[in-house]
Image: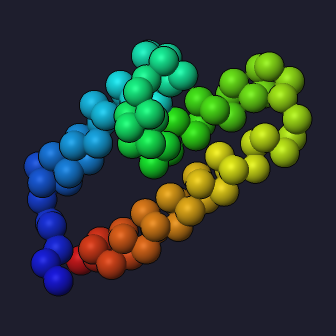
Amino acid sequence: MKTYQTAEVAGVLAGAPYFPMLLFPGAILPYERMPAALQRLADILPLTQWVKLLKAASLNAPAGSALVPMAIMLAIAAICICVSLQFFRWE
């Protein structure tokens, strides 16, 4: 597999999910007011899960309501770690 070794390429690849992460998680636009298709798209973003956890904590929601966002965040973290181990190499 090809490894990317320049900071410019890393910046572009890291910046690609930046704008969707700003718009869709519910921090700027209300998640509940989005169409169902956009909500499903937003649900795969880790920042959406973080906003859900913050809302649950601020509204004193039961602890069980935080389990799904935490599980999704852990799964995303595991996927990102696996991808980084595959592509990133120290020289």
Quarter of the image with the N terminus is bottom left
Could you tell me residue 78's position as x and y percent?
Answer: 53, 67
In the image, 15: left or right of 33?
left
Could you tell me residue 79's position as x and y percent?
Answer: 46, 67
* Residue at 15% from the left image edge and 67% from the top image edge: 4
Q: Quadrant of residue 59?
A: top right
Up-down: is 29 above or below 11?
above
Which one is in front, 89 or 60?
A: 60
* Residue at 38% from the left image edge and 37% from the top image edge: 37
Residue extending farthest to the front is 36
Up-down: is 35 above or below 82?
above
Up-down: is 76 above or below 87?
above
In the image, 22: left or right of 59?
left
Up-down: is 44 above or below 89?
above
* Residue at 52% from the left image edge and 60% from the top image edge: 77
Is residue 70 visible in this depiction of the protein? yes
In the image, 62: left or right of 72?
right
In the image, 77: left or right of 84?
right
